[in-house]
Amino acid sequence: LAHTCPGFPEHVGRDRALELLKPVLEDKAVAKVGQNLKFQSIVFNNRGIELAGLRFDTMIASYVINPGLKQHDLNFLAQHYLNLRKTTFEEVAGKGKGRKCFSDVDLEQASKYSCEDADVALRLMEVLGKQLREDENEELFYNVEMALIPVLLDMEITGIKIDKPFFSEMSETFSRELDQIEKEIYLEAGTEFNINSPQQLGTVLFDKLQLPILKRTSKTKAHSTDVKVLTKLAALPFKIPKLLLRYRTLSKLKATYLDSLVKLADPVTGRLHTSFNQTVAATGRLSSSNPNLQNIPIRGEEGREIRRGFVAEDGCRLLSADYSQVELRIFAHYSGDDAFIEAFREQEDIHTRTAAEIMSIGREEVTPDRRRIAKAINFGIIYGMGPHKLSEELGIDHETAKNYISAYYERYRGVARYRDEVIGAAREKGYVTTLFNRRRYLPDINHKNRIIRSEAERMAINTPIQGTAADLIKMAMIRIHGRLKKEGFRSRMLLQVHDELVFEVPEDEIDTAPKLIRSEMEGGFQLKVPLKVDMKIGRNWDEAH
DNA sequence: GCGATCACGT
DNA sequence: ACGTGATCGCG
């Protein structure tokens, strides 16, 4: 339809065609079936059309059926489910430098390609739809994943505002300090080299300066120079490890956040528009890219400073609402463990309680350091961590870590039961599920290699927990989005960061919107333990968090 | 273009 | 446990 170059036959033309199609595209009674409908919606949105009646997205159906697959593109799905080899985009448009714009592709080829796309998607619906029914995943597919598409679309289109001058100035400040550190590093090293190259850095540290090699990298067995190694080396009488740590922090923040976010922000509105991907994470979580707004720094002075650059529009505030310890609460629910459940019902500090339980001490004897250990163990257990990893994590010896873990399973009997049950079920069925029946296959659960098998077991323990948390927040997002719209709020959902939602709230809705948000987040589903949401409002994301 | 390393988040 | 991205250095 956009083919305009000379030589193409006369046709109705894009604008006229869209004008004719608009009523159908915007009619929610006309069901739309296709591949990656959020993307299609964005394309139409750019032409002032609001695609409605999203019924069946083949990409998302494939993801619900098997979220562990690496690919959900149409060519793969055609091959996998229909045993059909579809024309690839490359075949019609070429690749690399010679790649044509689709509107320059030969008209005959272009229309055939487009029709094939539509036809394959429709045929896939039959097969995928049947599978969804068989797996009892229709509820999850239609009422969660499909319903989430317009929510994510709105979030992406809205975007979040950043303070560009703030980031640019901060970047300048970082540059000056980096130059300074760079000089000092060269002085200490007695040579100039590329500090950003782990390989060159390794040569300087371990060959030239003869620092001890504490770790080798997993693939190539090169000398590791990561934070942990550098931190240990910082205890030695050399200045260079500390300088490198500082250099790493600053250059990471500058390159990954300050500079790239400024480049990606809309030149007119100053807003950043991420893509929320619904078919990437094997557990059911969302992911975010271009830019990834789910890994904005929060720890460290400079890291937090970056959050101050995420701001609310004039006359608005940012509101952050995050689930307090959702994963541990879901874990408590699954375990059915009385002590665990009681801790949450009584609103106790869960890490303090855990410390008291596994160290057999009174709660008043729990020091900050003991609490820190218990916290790491709580996290370790939901990741299915073994004593090896845990001892490494905490810097304690293997034996002590082992004792803590057995004490944990001893004290929280329900947790041990959950672990055995979920691994047993995975071995038998080949997959695990979340509370809402989201499935993840674990083909290696019966593998003969112990290391590979253990990894699958950790996934079996973690996926129902992480995945249920993902299900819960997705359902809350759908309800909140629906209510904000229906009840005429101007507050808008901007971001989801796994257990946190960020909103932009007009000043006159500060008294009303948070109540709605809290009630939908906390009250959507009753677990054996209450769900708790912490909320804060501020002019920027740091203040709101 | 791609694997490896490193570092940021939940 | 689950992600994304910058950079390097090889092919």
Image (cartoon, coloured by chain):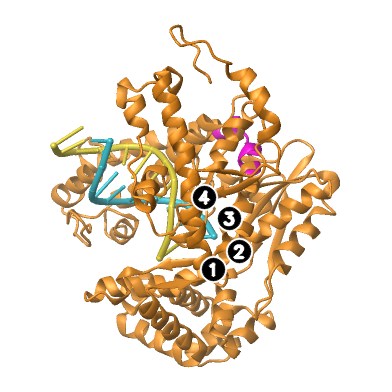
Chain colours: A orange, B cyan, C yellow
> Do tags 4 and 1 sit on the same chain?
yes
- Tell me whether marks 3 and 1 sit on the same chain: yes
Amino acid residing under circle 4 = Pro
Instruction: Identify the amino acid type marked 1.
Output: Glu
Give the alpha-carbon distance from disc 2 to disc 1, as whole Å.
7 Å
| Chain-order first, disc 4 or disc 3 | 3
Q: Nearer the viewer, mark 4 or mark 1?
A: 1
Q: Amino acid at mark 2?
A: Glu
Query: Which residue lies under the disc numbered 3?
Result: A145
Dot 2 and dot 1 residues touching (CB under 8 Å): yes
Q: Residue A153: give x, y in percent of width and height.
A: 62, 42
Q: Earlier in the sequence, mark 4 or mark 1?
A: 1
Q: Position of residue A234 (x, y in %)?
A: 31, 57
Q: Is residue A330 above or below residue A282?
A: below
Rendered view: C9 above or below A527 = above
Residue A205 spot, x, y in % from top left = 21, 49
Q: Are marks 2 and 1 on the same chain?
A: yes
Using the numbered discs, state the Cα–Cα distance from disc 4 to disc 3 in whole angstroms. 28 Å
User: Does dot 2 land on a helix, a strand or a loop?
Assistant: helix
The answer to whether marks 3 and 1 mark residues whose Cβ atoms lie closer than 8 Å is no
Q: Which residue is mark 2?
A: A139
Spatial separation of the CA atoms under disc 3 and disc 1? 14 Å
Q: Quadrant of residue A24?
A: top right
Residue at 38% across, 46% down: A78
Q: Which residues are magenta?
A: A154-167
* Residue density around tag 1, few if under 14, some if 14–19, many if 20 or more, within 10 Å: some
Judging by the rendered image, the residue that carries numbered circle 4 is A297
Image coordinates for residue A206, horizontal then vertical, percent: 17, 52
The residue labelled by disc 1 is A136
Query: Horizontal placement of A324 versus A505: left or right?
Result: left
